[in-house]
């Protein structure tokens, strides 16, 4: 299928009004912009907006500008300050995939396999990556997801309820054997190669992990010529239950079989700089972190609560990450606050919601249609949520060691 311009297709614009009748069918606004620019050759945002309004009724200028900017250089060229034209007659490869997009604020959600999308993305066009990938590799396959959704069998387990509270399902990472670990290595190697191509020099790449697997992620992605830059520690009680000897916890009541996990490592990598940091910052707007304030450096420890119930109700994804943590992290990954943040495993869109909340452009890729639809609903709701920055004591079974640990966490003792 050939087309006159290199477009990632259907685009729906959800207006920030509470009226469902104002939600336009996919492609309407995009078609109006393209139709106008096909005639006008070159036009300002104001002229494009006037033409779109003439066709469809009111559309905010910010939405038109976001769409134009997010599709430079693939679809549009910027010919001067605030002036755009269609990219000249690029032919789409006959077997090129088309991707649907939905835009919410400055966030684009794409229902796609990230490897397909990354292979077609313009080189050097992503300024940061923040993502939480699948780890068992199989836990997000159709088969395992249907077992999770039916609540029966599979890799997902429901942790026991000790205190009457319903627990969220967790994947069983411990079922990974040598072959799975090798596959994990190859998966992240391939992921690293794909990101290296699309990332600009100096782009930060931050990948959620856990203490048992972070070394595989770091070493495999470093094979792709990404530089390991350390870890961001999300200080939180993550893996629940199970630190005591199974079926012998009374006999060995002073023993933890493994350290109770109180942090989550997010592997930090960077595409190598072009020249010095200041050269890279000038040219690519990347090559550092945005400081929380002028006199405070960005630190590699972020204290975090488990994902609050309000957020889980908005986005009931089994791996939902909290806005308080994501907003700190996402804000930091663009040192000058300019560029596009990509989440290739977007799930319910929590990274994009955080990007919207801090005013950044973002793109999310999600291959599961149920989670993709969830993201479309969740992004505006999560992005506008007031987030509680206070860190609270986690609930913990057995004694008060969890509460004590949380107090120490709060006091910054770790
Ligand atoms: C660990 S979850 C991320 C959840 C996310 N942190 C959130 O807060 O909602 C990983 C997501 O990646 C998706 N996924 C797995 N493989 C993918 C692929 N090849 N391309 C795009 N999405 C993929 C899964 O469906 C799942 O929703």
Image (cartoon, grey):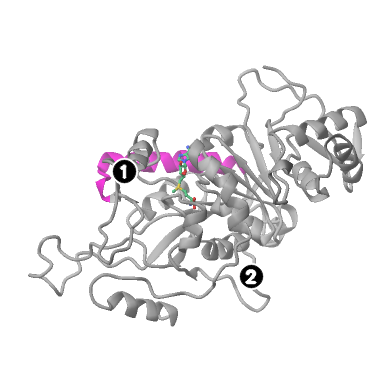
Q: Residue 36's spot in the image, x, y percent?
A: 87, 31
In this view, 262 is above or below 272: below
Position of 160 with respect to 300 (left or right) is left
Position of 327 with respect to 40 (left or right) is left
353 or 258, which lies in front? Answer: 353
| Magenta span of residues | 174-198
User: How far separated are the C-alphas under marks 1 and 2?
Assistant: 44 Å
* Count of marks, rendered view: 2
Residue linked to disc 2: 291
Quadrant into which the N terminus falls:
top right
Quadrant into which the C terminus falls:
bottom left
In this view, 297 is above or below 118: below
Q: Is residue 176 magenta?
A: yes
Mark in front: 1 vs 2: 1
Q: Is residue 228 visible?
A: no
How would you classify the magenta stretch by its main secondary structure?
A: helix
In this view, 361 is above or below 397: above
Q: Residue 105's spot in the image, x, y percent?
A: 70, 50
| Residue at (92% x, 31% y) in the render | 40
Q: Is residue 246 visible?
A: yes
Q: Is residue 260 magenta?
A: no
Instruction: Tell me the SS state at disc 1.
Output: loop
Residue linked to disc 1: 151
Q: Residue 337's spot in the image, x, y percent?
A: 70, 60
Instruction: Tell me the SS state at disc 2.
Output: loop
């Amino acid at each position: 299928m050939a087309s006159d311009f290199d477009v990632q297709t259907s685009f729906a614009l959800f207006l920030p009004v509470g009226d469902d009748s104002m939600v336009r069918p996919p492609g309407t606004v995009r078609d109006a912009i393209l139709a106008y620019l096909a005639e006008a050759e070159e036009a300002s945002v104001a002229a494009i907006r006037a033409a779109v309004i003439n066709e469809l009724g009111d559309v905010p200028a910010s939405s038109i500008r976001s769409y134009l900017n997010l599709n430079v250089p693939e679809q549009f060229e910027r010919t001067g300050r605030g002036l755009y034209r269609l990219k000249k007659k690029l032919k789409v490869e006959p077997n090129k995939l088309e991707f649907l997009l939905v835009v919410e604020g400055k966030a684009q959600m794409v229902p796609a396999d990230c490897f397909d999308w990354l292979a077609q993305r313009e080189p050097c066009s992503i300024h940061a990556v923040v993502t939480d990938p699948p780890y068992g590799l199989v836990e997000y396959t159709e088969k395992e997801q249907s077992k999770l959704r039916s609540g029966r069998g599979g890799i997902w387990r429901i942790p026991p309820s000790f205190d009457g509270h319903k627990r969220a399902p967790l994947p069983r990472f411990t079922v990974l054997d040598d072959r799975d670990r090798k596959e994990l290595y190859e998966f992240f190697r391939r992921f690293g190669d794909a990101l290296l191509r699309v990332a600009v020099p100096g782009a930060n790449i931050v990948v959620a992990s856990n203490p048992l697997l972070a070394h595989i992620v770091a070493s495999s992605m470093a094979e792709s010529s990404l530089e390991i830059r350390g870890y961001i520690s999300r200080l939180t009680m993550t893996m629940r239950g199970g630190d005591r000897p199974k079926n012998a916890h009374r006999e060995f009541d002073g023993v933890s079989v493994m350290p109770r996990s109180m942090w989550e490592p997010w592997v930090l990598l960077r595409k190598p700089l072009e020249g010095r940091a200041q050269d890279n910052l000038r040219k690519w707007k990347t090559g550092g972190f945005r400081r929380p304030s002028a006199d405070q450096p960005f630190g590699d420890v972020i204290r975090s609560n488990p994902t609050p119930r309000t957020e889980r109700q908005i986005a009931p994804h089994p791996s939902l990450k909290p806005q308080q943590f994501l907003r700190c992290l996402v804000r930091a990954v663009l040192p000058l606050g300019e560029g596009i943040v990509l989440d290739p495993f977007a799930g319910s869109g929590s990274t994009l919601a955080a990007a919207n909340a801090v005013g950044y452009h973002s793109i999310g890729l999600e291959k599961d249609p149920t989670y993709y639809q969830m993201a479309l609903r969740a992004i505006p709701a999560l992005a506008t949520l007031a987030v509680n920055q206070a860190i609270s004591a986690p609930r913990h079974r057995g004694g008060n060691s969890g509460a004590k640990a949380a107090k120490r966490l709060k006091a910054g003792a770790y």
